[in-house]
Amino acid sequence: MGKKQGNVPRKILLAILLGLASFFLDAAVIDAFHLFRTPVLDAVFGFFTDILVIAVAMLILPAVALLLRKDVQKAVLLCLAFLFAFLIGVSTKLAVHRLRPPLSPLDFAEPFYYSFPSLHALVAFALLPILISGFPRMRRPLIGLAFLVASTRLYFGVHYLSDVAWGAIIGYAVGWYLSHDHLTKPGAVRRFLASHRLELRRKMAHIVFGLAIVLCIQAGVLTTIRLGILTLIGLLISLIERRSRLPLISPMLDAFERPDARRSFPGKGLLFFLLGSFLSLFLFPQDIALASILVLTFGDAVSHLFGIRFGKVAHPLTDKKFVEGAIAGFAAAFLGALLFVSAAEALVAAFAAMLVEASEVRLNVLRADDNLLIPLAAGAAILALRLSGMFL
């Protein structure tokens, strides 16, 4: 045990030295990769640099597999690694302001316009230690996939070697910390995971479902009409399930729904998530709709979980939530929206979402569901800001 702990400083030192050395090889590596460009390799590397492929292969499918295995802790850690990596990557890009290589073939919106560090490498390597911990038999393919994702950024000339190297180093440090033994020993975190299993399962399913909707819309699998039909099918299943148990559907509702909602309105959260996504896609341009769905996906889940774990200060708008949760939800919602809209638009979307999330909007005696109100509020805020800019 002592030997392993003693090796850690050496590995850190070696990683830092390699990271520093990478700055001296930036130009040479870009030139070298440019020599190997072929149509076949373009197709292969293009597939593995697609953010949709990375999200499905390294986040969504593993998280679903872990949830089905009832390994909620690793599924939570996997999503936390993604969120922390994304936050660190975007923050560092904005702080460093390093420009992309001069011959970069792609155009990027701010803050993704900046080059250091590679967000692809940072996310892939942040997920890697937790994936290896959850799927030890897949260790080598997972390591190979992470290196392949990172190398695609060099192949296409959109990053320097140092961007990718430091992205991998920082990302792996995030993943290693989250997957390390100190987080699984008996203590506050473990007690929290044990005492809130249902809420963790619900919010993990919430995140996975939201990401799946966004990816399907981007890929053209889900259109506005198809999403509307899916919502109607969901409503029909809910009505049937109130009267009799259904194969596959009922066991899933047992695992992911609160008992009171399970009895009164089966699948309520999922149904309103579908309805909110459908209305967002129907009412707003696609980029605003996708940003609004991600605001709901990340903001609502993170706000709730962070609030029940770290909440101390009561929210001024409601006695059921905490200020700490609202701040964390705001940050997560902002980062989610930032994937599709500008920083200013993401900011107003996150603020509108957290304001609505804390307010109890009622229709007669019924409380309107957050899964419906949050994306509509976020989308309306972005659209208002965009229209106001047109008339100024």
Image (cartoon, grey):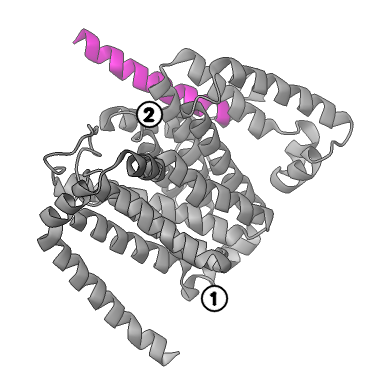
Residue sitting at x 50%, y 61%: 131
User: 298 or 75, which lies in front?
Assistant: 75
Q: In the rendered image of this protein, does residue 244 appear above or below residue 199?
A: above
- Residue 345 placement (x, y as % from top left): 31, 27
User: 73 or 1, which lies in front?
Assistant: 1
The quadrant the C terminus occupies is: top left
Badge 1 or badge 2: first in the primary sequence: 1
Asked if residue 9 shows in the view, the reply is yes
Q: In the rendered image of this protein, does residue 368 appear above or below residue 127?
A: above
Q: Residue furthest right?
A: 244
Q: In the rendered image of this protein, does residue 137 appear above or below residue 366?
A: below
- Residue 316 placement (x, y as % from top left): 44, 39
Q: Amino acid at mark 2?
A: Ala
Residue sitting at x 89%, y 33%: 244
Q: Secondary structure at mark 2?
A: helix
Q: In this picture, which residue range is highlighted in magenta?
A: 371-392
- Tell me, for residue 30, which label it has, or none: none
Q: Is residue 73 left or right of residue 25?
A: right
Residue sitting at x 27%, y 33%: 343
Local crowd size for mark 2, using a 10 Å CA cut-off: few (<14), some (14–19), many (≥20): many
Q: Is residue 287 left or right of residue 220?
A: left
Q: Amino acid at mark 1?
A: Lys
- Residue 295 placement (x, y as % from top left): 44, 34
Instruction: Please say if the residues under marks 1 and 2 sit with CB atoms less than 8 Å apart.
Output: no
Asked if residue 311 shows in the view, the reply is no
Give the CA distance from mark 1 to mark 2. Answer: 38 Å
Q: Secondary structure at mark 1?
A: loop
Residue topped by disc 1: 185
Residue topped by disc 2: 349
Local crowd size for mark 1, using a 10 Å CA cut-off: few (<14), some (14–19), many (≥20): few
